[in-house]
Amino acid sequence: MSKPIKILIDEMDDGWDDKLRKLGYDAYSVKKLRSDGLKLRTDYSVINYAKENDMILITRDTESGQACEENDLPFILLDNEEIFKIVVDKLKNI
């Protein structure tokens, strides 16, 4: 049996944790964890927290994505190219 996926949502997408939890995911927000007293002020501390807690980081920060990639940490990078593809797909359906 596989272990549940734990997700850390970077601060730009605060609120996605709530939406993902409603879908059954074990999701947390950097912004909310910080307001609970955790010191997650730098990219390094956020990435390190995700690593220590076996989490997938969802971020729009290219540097954080590159750091995850270099350190073999699971991540989803929502970069401008991915967002642009979504816009183009939606325009095709209008």
Image (spheres, rainbow, N blue to C red):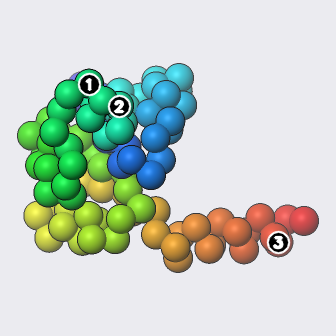
Q: Residue at x 14, y 50 (%)?
A: 45
Do the residues bearing badges 2 and 3 touch, measured as CB atoms within 8 Å? no
Secondary element at image label 2: helix
- Density class for disc 1 (Cα within 10 Å; few <14, some 14-19, many ≥20) is few
Percent position (x, y) of residue 13?
A: 47, 47
Do the residues bearing badges 2 and 1 touch, measured as CB atoms within 8 Å? yes
Amino acid type indicated by mark 2: Lys
Q: Which mark is residue 32?
A: 2
Compute the Cα span from label 2 to label 3.
Answer: 37 Å
Report the front residue among 13 and 89.
13
Report the front residue among 2 and 10.
10
Secondary element at image label 1: loop
Could you tell which of marks 2 and 3 lies nearer the N-terminus? 2
Q: Against 86, is 10 above or below?
A: above
The residue that label 3 is drawn on is: 92
- Density class for disc 3 (Cα within 10 Å; few <14, some 14-19, many ≥20) is few
Secondary element at image label 3: helix
Amino acid type indicated by mark 3: Lys
The residue that label 1 is drawn on is: 36
